[in-house]
Amino acid sequence: MVRIVSLLALAAMALAPPALAQTRPAPAATASNLIDLNNASRDDLMTLDGIGEVRADAIIRSRPFKAKTELVERRLIPEHLYDKIADKVMARPPPGPAPTPGRPPPQKRS
């Protein structure tokens, strides 16, 4: 009897799915694998879901972007499409003008 119970328990463990399967979460998006709206080529932009030739060209013509949300604010793409691609894009601000050597940077007026 003990032997039958042991065999049944062993069979149940062998057939049962793992209790805590070790799954690795998808890696979080990093700046290195995001598409920069201010520098991406037309082909890079077209790899995004819902961005074809026309929208890619419109994005390029509308540069520079201060924030990726400007895609919706400027009505380049609809909000539902932005929701699909927001985690795949970024808007790295373009570099400002370099200060002239030997001259102090211009002062802002109050």
Image: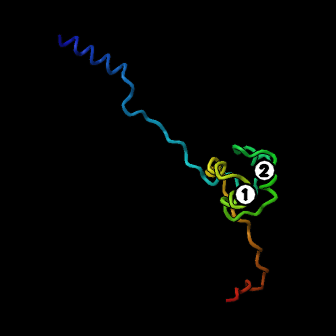
Residue for point 29% across, 18% down: 10
Dot 2: element: helix
In the image, farthest residue toward the left: 1
Asked if one can make out residue 36 in the rendered structure from this viewpoint, the answer is: yes
- Residue 7 position, x and y percent, is 27, 13
Q: Nearer the viewer, residue 91 or 61?
A: 61
Task: Quarter of the image for the N terminus: give it.
Answer: top left
Real-space CA distance between mark 1 and mark 2, rounded to the nearest whole angstrom: 13 Å
Whether residue 110 sits left or right of residue 42 in the image: it is left
Residue 60 location, quadrant: bottom right
According to the picture, the residue beneath numbered tag 1 turns out to be: 75
Whether residue 88 sits left or right of residue 103 in the image: it is left
Does 73 appear above or below 83? Answer: below
Asked if one can make out residue 91 in the rendered structure from this viewpoint, the answer is: no
Dot 1: element: loop
Q: Which of pointers 1 and 2 indicates the residue nearer the eye?
A: 1
Callout 1 amino acid: Arg
- Residue 6 position, x and y percent, is 24, 16
Callout 2 amino acid: Ala
Image disc number at residue 56: 2
Residue for point 35% across, 19% down: 14
Task: Quarter of the image for the C terminus: give it.
Answer: bottom right
Residue for point 55% across, 48% down: 28
Residue for point 37% across, 19% down: 15
